[in-house]
Image: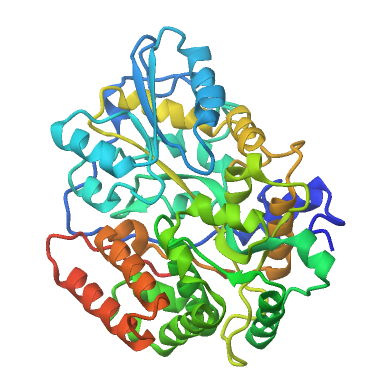
Amino acid sequence: MSSSADFNRRQVLRRIGLTAFVAGPGAGLLAGCATAGSGSGASSAPSPVASGGAGTAANPFSVKADAPLEVVIFSGGYTDAYATKIHEPLYKKTYAQAAIKHTATQRIGTQLRPRFVSGDAPDVVNNSGSDPLDLAALQAEGHLADLTALFEAPSIDDPGKKVKDTITPAVLTNALVAGKPHVLNYTVSHRGLWYNAKLFAEKGWEVPTNWDAFLALCEQIKGAGITPFAYPGQVGPFYQTWNILYTAAKIGGNQVIIDIDNLVDGAWTKDPVIKAVQVWADLQKQFGDKAYFGLDHTQTQLKQLQNKVAFYPTGSWVENEMAKEIPDDFEYAVMALPDITRGDVMPTGAFFVGVGENFFVSAKGKNPLGGMEYLRVMLSQEGARGFTQETKNLTVVNGAADGVDLPPGLKSAAAVQGAAGQNVITDARYEGWYKKLYDYSQAQTNSVMAGRITAQQFAENMQKEADKTKKDKRITKQTRTS
């Protein structure tokens, strides 16, 4: 039951909706409608283009040819090789005299917070991983450049087209912080339960579509001496936080997550949330292993590659992250979250598909104009195709993956997305809007999964923290309608 069967490259890209965003079923799959409000914080930093003078199609931001550029990349699942091998050399092709300072780190927030405070901000930041910077706080302090000019700029490949017309529409709706585009989400991601398709084929295990079948399969897996489910409690508890939130949306619809993002009174204590927390806490108690709470993501993922863990909740970057470790008897595949109740609002096969891996330009950096141009290079066909070839993950640039051989896990994700159709689970935007609340939700996730608190206590604790966030006038509030 190979996950790659019957899917050629064009079929995969068509189902993902990236060959061309024309009218049709594929066009809307990635167009999540998160809309940020104007907020009450500082006004957005003006576009750095304003200080660059009149530009040309080749150099719309009037970048100085010899201006140094500093780029900081999160070196996680994608590593940082795509920047050093693809994007930075492409930038240098046009600006050969520009020295590029490259920094790779897995602790973006820890490393960069002091620099933003001291006024020594890098020009381009890949704000990803378990220790990101607080985007809302940066925006309120005027550190995030307005990316309107980037999206309105001519495309490198076709000056007759604007950059915004060459990318997945979800990029624009997910770029908003306080009502204006400040963030570039560069990759298309799929999140669900990942498993070894070869192991399942060998054992004759069928992928379950409802919770009862899921529990029955977990019994079989446990009987085979394999831990049915695990997530990393040290670096990666947000994987399970996602699992809970997406399950809540499966039960009660995307409005459940939208209400959480909008800090609606009682959003965390609604029945779908409590039910989602309860089923996963029960699963952990019956089929999990607390030993994994002490591991990080790569350690847990290695256990899965050794067939010591069957189901693992994460995103499609995992295949590249573990590329050097994947044995011959392992083939990544993903399944949608099972139906929880007979009355789930979202139908069987509903699946998370979104954009991620965010980048921003520092408005107060030394070369924000170069930072904008660097992002434009990333959004070129050559830049995006190179990223896919290097990381085996898709970007938001339409058609850039044509001709690229895609790995089994991504083909599996495309198949699951194709089956989901328009039934796409939305992302939780409070992750980027309210970092303290997001961090708190991860700690509460570990607590409830470890049995230290109940599902009801989880919901009440989260609601109290959300209420504090809502009442704190120092925090810029964001809203979305869909």
| Rendering coords of residue 248 (x, y %) | 48, 79
| Rendering coords of residue 202 (x, y %) | 83, 65
Residue drawn at (45%, 39%) of the image: 151
| Rendering coords of residue 232 (x, y %) | 47, 60
Residue 210 versus residue 328 in the image, above or below = below
| Rendering coords of residue 107 (x, y %) | 34, 42
Residue lying at the far top of the rendered structure: 97
Residue 236 versus residue 277 in the image, above or below = above
The image quarter in which residue 386 lies: top right
The image quarter in which residue 236 lies: bottom left
Q: Is residue 393 visible?
A: no
Residue 321 versus residue 268 in the image, above or below = above
Which part of the image, by quadrant, shows the C terminus? bottom left
Residue drawn at (74%, 37%) of the image: 404
Q: Is residue 47 visible?
A: yes
Residue drawn at (45%, 85%) of the image: 278
